[in-house]
Every structure is written in structure tokens, then in C-alpha cells.
Image (spheres, rainbow, N blue to C red):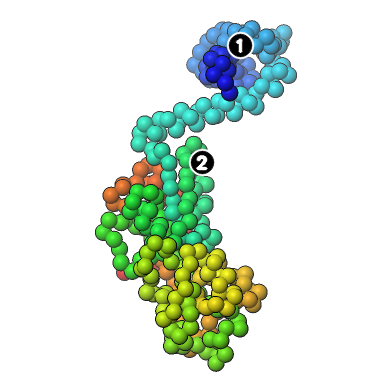
């Protein structure tokens, strides 16, 4: 749209949109007037001025109640959309003036992208704040937490941590099961059952942050670690026989069913690891209205997915 286009006064302003749509939806000038708290003559006059400036007959006044013309019916869908957009814009501007975030960023550990109902929470948030810009970043756990600490993201969806940073606050949402997996022809499996010493001696593929030397000691067991920052890459490396890995059960369900991947048959250890899923935010960057709402919606989404939650960790 050019500057000249913007300089032309629109024939449909907010006031006329409201009157036109209200008349169309309520079927008469008098019903629309009652809905708008006006006298029928004022509604009729507003429509008359609009018709004159448009050069269109919007209502047939030859009957007891005005009947919309074909031209009015053709304009109605777009008029409704414009009015809805104006209402959304007004609501969003009022929310911003009350402290709503200008944008909301959620960092998600890649292993949890397909395994948790975070999208349901965002869908509910979008219904309340349709104009709020939302950014979702997939990042390894250390990187996701660093984003929260730096204020780059308001929230991070991560696995439970061994230690909690005093600058962080968190809320438990549910649990996710990691399973120890390996390719079916991997040398580790030749003796049959596997013990913890075998895990130490065979290469492990570990999903870890790009910029952190820290690794989660609950899952980093092998003396030889190969690292990647995505579970997709880890899965491909395991399928290629390059090592074994802890991966979310939901993420590896298909290759397990196809037989291209197997759960490590254990002799002395459990090949399942259940970890809490937490949503984390910074105490130094208190959550705004949309962030607080997303926290509530995440809790609701996880509860809906799993009603039978285990006891809270102590």
C-alpha cells in the first residue's frame, strides 16, 4: 500500500463497520439500535450516509423491515473479518498497556518436542492472545537453561536437573521415560545380557549442549562419549551401530517396533530411566501475564495427558 493510498479516508471506519455488521446480524434497524443503545433513526442515518458514499444500495427499504441487498451480503464476510481484527487489535493494545509481553519465547529440549503436549498449551494461549508473537526454540538442556538465565527465553521445557540454580524457579509437569537402546547387531549384544561394565566399555551417544562441557551424570555412563545436540542425530548414529544411547521411548517407538533398534537387555541395571519434565523460568526475569498463563496451560495440558501422576519427587 502506498502513502497515497493511506492518505485516502476509508469509507468504512470502525463506527460504520459496527453499525453495518450489527444491522446485518440482527435483521433490522430497530433491533440493531437496541443492541447498540441508539435510536433507530440514528442507525438508519448512518447506513444512509454509507450507502451514499459507496454509491451502493445496501438495504431494500420497500418492505416493513429493510432487507439486505446482494451487495450488502457480498460485503458482510470481509466486514466481519475487519471488525474482528479491530477488536483483536484493541484487546492486544490494552493488554500491552497492562504489561503483556511484546513477545513470548519458549525453549524446548529437543527430546521433548514430540513427547509432550506443549503445543496444546500454546494453542490455548493463541485463543486468548491471538496477536501475541510466540517463538519456540529447540535447544539442548544446558543451552535452553542458559537462554532463560539470560532473559532470551521466558520459559524452558526441560528434564529435571541434578541441582537447582537459586536464580531459577520451576514447576513439575510430568514424567518422561528414557530407554537404553542400541542397534541389533552391535557387538555389545553378542554375549546376551548386558551389565553395567559393558556400558562403560562401549561408546555412548549423548545428547548435550553445544557450548557446555557439563553432562548429566545420570545418563553419561560410558568412558567414551560422542556428543550431538539433537536426538535425531543421536538416533541415526545409534542405528548406524556407532554406539548406544538413552532416548525417549516415544521418540524411538517406530524403530523399536521395526526391529532396527532394540532395548539393551540388562543383567545388572534397569534399561529404563524415568525423569521429571519441568518448566523453568528465571527469578531475575519474573513472568509476565502471558508467561503466567502459559505456565497454567502447560500444567493443564500435562494433567489432561496423564491423570495418574506419580507422587512428587522429594
Query: Mark 1: which secondary structure?
Result: helix
- Say which residue label 2 marks: 127
Q: Is residue 146 left or right of residue 192?
A: left
Which residue is found at the position 37% from the left and 42% from the top? 289
Q: Which numbered disc, 2 or 1, marks the residue that appears first in the sequence?
A: 1
Q: Position of residue 59 (x, y in %)?
A: 68, 13
Q: Residue at x 53, y 69 (%)?
A: 234
Front residue (pair 172, 148): 148
Report the number of discs.
2
How packed mark 2 is, by other alpha carbons closer than 10 Å (few <14, some 14-19, many 20 or more), is few
> The N terminus appears in which quarter of the rendering?
top right
Residue 81, position in %: x, y? 59, 28
The answer to whether residue 280 is left or right of residue 14 is left
Is residue 265 in view?
yes
Q: CA distance from mark 2 to mark 1?
A: 33 Å
- Residue furthest to the bottom: 191
Q: Residue at x 68, y 14 (%)?
A: 58
Q: Closest to the observer: 196 or 276?
A: 196
Location of residue 188 in the rendering, given as x and y in whole percent from the top left corner: 53, 86
Q: Secondary structure at mark 2?
A: helix
Q: Residue at x 50, y 31 (%)?
A: 88
Image quadrant assignment for residue 53: top right
Q: Is residue 303 visible to the viewer in this orientation of the structure?
A: no
Mark number for residue 239?
none
Seen from the viewer's position, the closer of residues 201 and 10 is 201
Task: Indicate which disc residue 50 carries.
Answer: 1
Q: Quadrant of the C terminus?
A: bottom left
Q: Position of residue 311 (x, y in %)?
A: 38, 68
Q: Vertically, is 93 above or below 135?
A: above
Q: Residues within 10 Å of mark 1 (few under 14, many from 20)?
A: many
Asked if the residues shown at circle 2 and circle 1 are in contact, with their CB atoms under 8 angstroms apart, the answer is no
Amino acid at each position: 500500500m502506498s502513502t497515497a493510498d493511506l492518505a485516502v479516508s476509508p469509507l468504512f471506519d470502525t463506527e460504520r463497520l459496527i453499525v453495518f455488521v450489527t444491522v446485518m446480524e440482527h435483521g433490522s434497524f430497530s433491533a440493531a439500535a437496541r443492541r447498540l443503545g441508539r435510536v433507530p433513526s440514528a442507525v438508519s442515518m448512518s447506513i444512509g450516509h454509507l450507502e451514499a458514499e459507496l454509491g451502493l444500495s445496501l438495504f431494500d427499504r420497500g418492505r416493513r423491515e429493510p432487507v439486505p441487498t446482494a451487495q450488502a451480503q457480498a460485503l458482510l464476510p470481509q466486514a466481519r473479518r475487519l471488525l474482528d481484527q479491530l477488536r483483536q487489535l484493541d484487546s492486544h493494545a490494552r493488554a500491552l498497556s497492562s504489561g503483556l509481553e511484546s513477545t513470548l519465547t519458549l525453549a524446548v529440549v529437543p527430546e521433548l518436542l514430540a513427547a509432550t503436549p506443549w503445543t496444546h498449551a500454546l494453542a490455548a494461549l493463541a485463543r486468548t492472545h491471538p496477536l501475541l508473537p510466540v517463538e519456540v526454540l529447540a535447544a539442548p538442556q544446558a543451552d535452553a537453561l542458559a537462554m532463560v538465565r539470560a532473559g532470551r527465553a521466558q520459559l524452558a521445557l526441560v528434564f529435571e536437573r541434578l541441582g537447582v540454580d537459586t536464580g531459577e524457579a520451576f514447576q513439575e509437569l510430568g514424567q518422561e521415560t528414557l530407554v537404553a537402546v542400541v542397534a541389533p547387531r552391535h557387538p555389545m549384544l553378542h554375549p546376551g545380557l548386558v551389565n553395567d561394565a559393558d556400558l562403560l566399555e562401549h561408546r555412548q551417544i549423548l545428547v548435550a549442549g553445544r557450548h557446555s562441557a557439563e553432562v548429566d551424570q545420570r545418563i553419561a555412563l560410558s568412558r567414551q562419549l560422542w556428543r550431538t545436540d539433537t536426538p535425531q542425530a543421536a538416533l541415526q548414529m545409534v542405528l548406524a551401530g556407532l554406539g548406544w544411547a538413552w532416548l525417549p521411548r516415544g521418540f524411538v517407538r517406530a524403530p523399536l517396533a521395526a526391529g532396527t533398534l532394540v532395548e539393551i537387555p540388562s543383567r545388572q541395571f534397569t534399561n529404563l530411566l524415568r525423569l521429571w519434565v519441568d518448566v523453568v523460568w528465571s527469578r531475575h526475569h519474573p513472568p509476565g501475564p502471558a508467561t503466567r498463563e502459559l505456565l497454567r496451560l502447560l500444567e493443564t495440558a500435562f494433567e489432561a495427558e496423564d491423570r495418574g501422576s506419580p507422587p512428587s519427587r522429594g
